[in-house]
C-alpha cells in the first residue's frame, strides 16, 4: 500500500519450464513462475496500480477480463508491452465482488500465449456482501483454472494449430486444473466454495459431480446471483466463470469427483475432493445473495446486432462480415447510455459454437432464442455462449470512461483469426 492509498501489485511475464508428466520438461510461460500466475485480490473501492513487466522475448499485453476500468488500463491489443518493457495499469475498483481473470491479448498471438500458461485469477472482494459465504482463500474458497491441453505422445506440449483447429478450436487430451493433472483437495469444512474458470482456448466444459452433491451456483462472471441456484450440470465456455458451493455434509469419508466433459469428447476428473471425517462448520448459505436490478429495456435504448460467422469472405472468421482491424472502430456508443445488443451465429454449414465477450462492462442477458435466461444466467455476465443457430439479446450499460474497447469470440483460435471488433465510448 502506497502512502497515497494506492495498492500496488507487480506481475512479471516470463518463459519457464514445467514437468506436467515427470521427466518431460515442457517450455511454458507464466506470471511470476513457470505456469499461470498469482491470484490478485482487489478490494471494492480501492485504487490499484498493477505493474506488468514483460520478460518474454515477444510482445504481450495483460487484459483484466471482466473488470470495469478506463480503456487505457484495459490491456487489450491497443496496450502492447514490448520485450523488456513495463506497463502500468491504474484504476479504481468499482464493481461488485466477483471472480475475474487476467491474460494476454496481443493481436494474433493471444491463443498461443494463453495456451503456454499466461493466465491468472483476479478476485474482487467487497466486505459489504452477504455473510455466510466461505471466504478463507485456499481453505474453503478455492480458485480452479480449468484448461484442456493437447499433449503429444512424447509428453510434449506445443501450440501448432492447423486449419481445422482454427475453425473448430484447439481441443486436447489432458485437462489441467491450476496447471496440475487430477489434483486432490483435502476439504476441512462443510461448505466448499469453488471459483471455476474455463481457461481453455476453445473447449466448452460441461461440469458435474457424478456421485456428489449438487452444485449450488452463487455467482456468474460479474458477481453474485440474486439467490443460490442448485444445478446438476454447469456449462462453461472459454473465459466464463462460475462460483459454486459444494455442501460436503453427506460426503464425509468419501471422495467427490468433479467431472469435466470436453466439447471435443474427452471426459476428465478435474478435481478429487477428499473430505476429512471431521468437517468444520463454516457457516450457512444465505437464501438471498444480491439484489440485482431487473434486466428491463429502457424505451430509448439503442439497438445493434452482431452476426458471428465462420464463413466470412475468403473463409475468414468475422463479426458482421468483417475481420478485426485495429485501425477501424466498428461501433460508437455514448458514455452512460443503455443499448440492446442482439448477437447471433450464422454459417450453419459449420456447426461451431461461439461465445461473445465484451470488455469494459458486465451485461445482463435479456433473452436466449426469445426465452428469458435460466436463473444461473440471470446475473452479471461478460461472456455468453452461443450454440449454432442461437440468438441472444444483451442489455449493455456503458460506463463513464471514454475510449476504445473490444468485443469478440472468446474461443481464442477464432479471436486470433479476426472474430473481434472495437467499440468506442464517447
Ligand atoms: Cu478474456 Cu478480450 O478477453
Ligand atoms: Cu475481456
Ligand atoms: Cu467463435
Image (tube, rainbow, N blue to C red):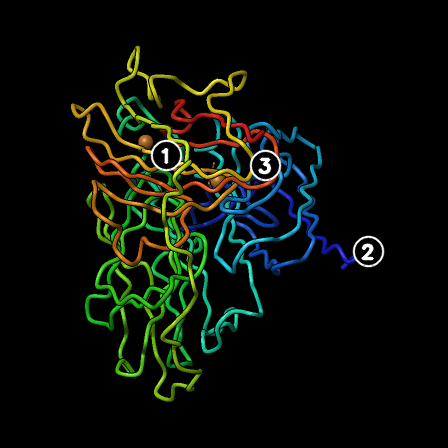
Q: Nearer the viewer, residue 130 or 372?
A: 372
Local packing at callout 2 (Cα closer than 10 Å; few below 14, some 14-19, many 20+) is few
View extreme (left): residue: 349
Where residue 246 sits, quadrant-wise, is bottom left
Sequence-wise first label, 3 or 1: 3
Quick one: quadrant of the N terminus? bottom right
Sequence-wise first label, 2 or 1: 2
Local packing at callout 3 (Cα closer than 10 Å; few below 14, some 14-19, many 20+) is many
Q: Which residue is mark 1?
A: 341
| Residue located at (33% from left, 68% from top) | 228
Residue 235 rendering spot, x and y as whole percentages: 27, 52
Mark 2 vs mark 1, foreground winner is: 1
View extreme (top): residue: 314
| Residue 4, label in figure | 2
| Residue located at (43% from left, 64% from top) | 291
Mark 2 vs mark 3, foreground winner is: 2
Q: Which residue is mark 3?
A: 75
| Residue 100, label in figure | none
Where residue 286 sits, quadrant-wise, is bottom left
Q: Are marks 2 and 1 in contact (CB under 8 Å)?
A: no
The CA distance from mark 2 to mark 3 is 24 Å
Amino acid at each position: 500500500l502506497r502512502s497515497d492509498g494506492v495498492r500496488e501489485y507487480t506481475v512479471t511475464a516470463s518463459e519457464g519450464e514445467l514437468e506436467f508428466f515427470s521427466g518431460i520438461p515442457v517450455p511454458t510461460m507464466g506470471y511470476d513462475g513457470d505456469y499461470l500466475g498469482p491470484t490478485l485480490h482487489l478490494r471494492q473501492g480501492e485504487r490499484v496500480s498493477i505493474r506488468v513487466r514483460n520478460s518474454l522475448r515477444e510482445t504481450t499485453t495483460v487484459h483484466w477480463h471482466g473488470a470495469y476500468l478506463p480503456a487505457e488500463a484495459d490491456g487489450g491489443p491497443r496496450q502492447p508491452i514490448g520485450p523488456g518493457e513495463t506497463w502500468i495499469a491504474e484504476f479504481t475498483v468499482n464493481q461488485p465482488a466477483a471472480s475475474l481473470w487476467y491474460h494476454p491479448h496481443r493481436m494474433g498471438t493471444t491463443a498461443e500465449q494463453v495456451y503456454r500458461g499466461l493466465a491468472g485469477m483476479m478476485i474482487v472482494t467487497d466486505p459489504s456482501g452477504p455473510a455466510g459465504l466461505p471466504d478463507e482463500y485456499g481453505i474453503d474458497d478455492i480458485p480452479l483454472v480449468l484448461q484442456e491441453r493437447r499433449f503429444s505422445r512424447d509428453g510434449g506440449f506445443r501450440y501448432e494449430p492447423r486449419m481445422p483447429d482454427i475453425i473448430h478450436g484447439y481441443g486436447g487430451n489432458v485437462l489441467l486444473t491450476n496447471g496440475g493433472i487430477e489434483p486432490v483437495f483435502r476439504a476441512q469444512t462443510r461448505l466448499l466454495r469453488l471459483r471455476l474458470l474455463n481457461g481453455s482456448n476453445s473447449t466448452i466444459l460441461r461440469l458435474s459431480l457424478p456421485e456428489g452433491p449438487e452444485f449450488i451456483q452463487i455467482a456468474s462472471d460479474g458477481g453474485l446471483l440474486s439467490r443460490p441456484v442448485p444445478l446438476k450440470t454447469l456449462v462453461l465456455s472459454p473465459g466464463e466463470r462460475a462460483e459454486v458451493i459444494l455442501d460436503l455434509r453427506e460426503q464425509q469419508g468419501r471422495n467427490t469427483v468433479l467431472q469435466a466433459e470436453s466439447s471435443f469428447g474427452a471426459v476428465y476428473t478435474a478435481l478429487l475432493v477428499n473430505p476429512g471425517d471431521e468437517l468444520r462448520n463454516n457457516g450457512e448459505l444465505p437464501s438471498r445473495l444480491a439484489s440485482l436490478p431487473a434486466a428491463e429495456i429502457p424505451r430509448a435504448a439503442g439497438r445493434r446486432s452482431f452476426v458471428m460467422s465462420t464463413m466470412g469472405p475468403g473463409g475468414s472468421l468475422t463479426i458482421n462480415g468483417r475481420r478485426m482491424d485495429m485501425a477501424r472502430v466498428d461501433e460508437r456508443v455514448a458514455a452512460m447510455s443503455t443499448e440492446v445488443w442482439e448477437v447471433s451465429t450464422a454459417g450453419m454449414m459449420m456447426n461451431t459454437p461461439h461465445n461473445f465477450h465484451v470488455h469494459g462492462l458486465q451485461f445482463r442477458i435479456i433473452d436466449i432464442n426469445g426465452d428469458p435466461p435460466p436463473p444461473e444466467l440471470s446475473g452479471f455476465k461478460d461472456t455468453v455462449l452461443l450454440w449454432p443457430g442461437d440468438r441472444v439479446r444483451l442489455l449493455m450499460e456503458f460506463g463513464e470512461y471514454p475510449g476504445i474497447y473490444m468485443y469478440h469470440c472468446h474461443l481464442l483460435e477464432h479471436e486470433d483469426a479476426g472474430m473481434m471488433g472495437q467499440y468506442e465510448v464517447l
